[in-house]
Image (cartoon, rainbow, N blue to C red):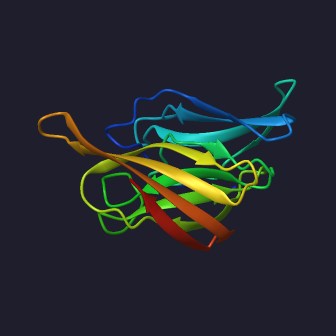
Amino acid sequence: PRPVPASSTRPDDDAKPRISWRGDGALFSVSVLQKALDSDSRDRRVIRVYDRQGNHQSTSEPVAGLEHVLCWRPSGNLLASSQRFGFDGGGAGRPDRHDIVFFEKNGLRHGEFRLRETGKYKIKELSWSPDSDVLAVWIERDDYDSGMKTQTVMYCYILISPSKSSFGRLG
């Protein structure tokens, strides 16, 4: 296999693992911070999938700027996370770009859509509806200079396919 450039995490990543179960309970996924293997690479987030006995099934392909949020679609066909762009070690692109990204259980990337939010914020959590049709995105706007939380925004995205979505903003 050819080497893949290492990606890194956002400065606000708390380095804690996140766990999400598939709807049928047969598999679970873990988003973890993988330490750099050498001084030329960087720490990066990866998603690992395990069966209910704890046997490793797959590891996600490297994604620059992959963030800590993780949620398995109840129907079981996709894992959702987020990817931030435009910072050192992040995804190549504009600094205000932020995508919701999807992975298959085998770790391969399976589409994305771009968030419409702008300014300083972070995604706190993702949550699917029980019927797997709607993905809720909890966004917290921060004033990073003063450390004060200024606004919490919730978006709901109706997933038509991983590359097409419609959305609505709640409160």
The foreground one among 45 and 71 is: 71
Residue shown at 39% from the left, 67% from the top = 116
Can you tell which quarter of the image residue 135 is in?
A: bottom right
Q: Does residue 131 lie above or below 53 as drawn?
A: below
x, y percentage for residue 55? 84, 29
Q: In this view, does 153 lie to the left or right of 119?
A: right
The foreground one among 165 and 39 is: 165
Q: Is residue 149 left or right of residue 92?
A: left
x, y percentage for residue 88? 31, 52
Residue 2 in sight here: no
| Residue furthest front in the image | 171
Q: Does residue 151 lie above or below 90 as drawn?
A: above
Residue 108 in sight here: yes
Can you tell which quarter of the image residue 112 is in?
A: bottom right
Residue shown at 55% from the left, 28% from the top = 17
Q: In this view, does 94 lie to the left or right of 76?
A: left
Q: Quadrant of the N terminus?
A: bottom right
Residue shown at 64% from the left, 58% from the top = 134
Residue shown at 38% from the left, 60% from the top = 85
| Residue furthest bottom in the image | 164
Count of numbered marks: 0
x, y percentage for residue 151? 27, 45
| Residue furthest top in the image | 53
The foreground one among 101 and 74 is: 74
x, y percentage for residue 169? 43, 61
The foreground one among 31 and 169 is: 169
Q: Does residue 69 lie above or below 118 as drawn?
A: above
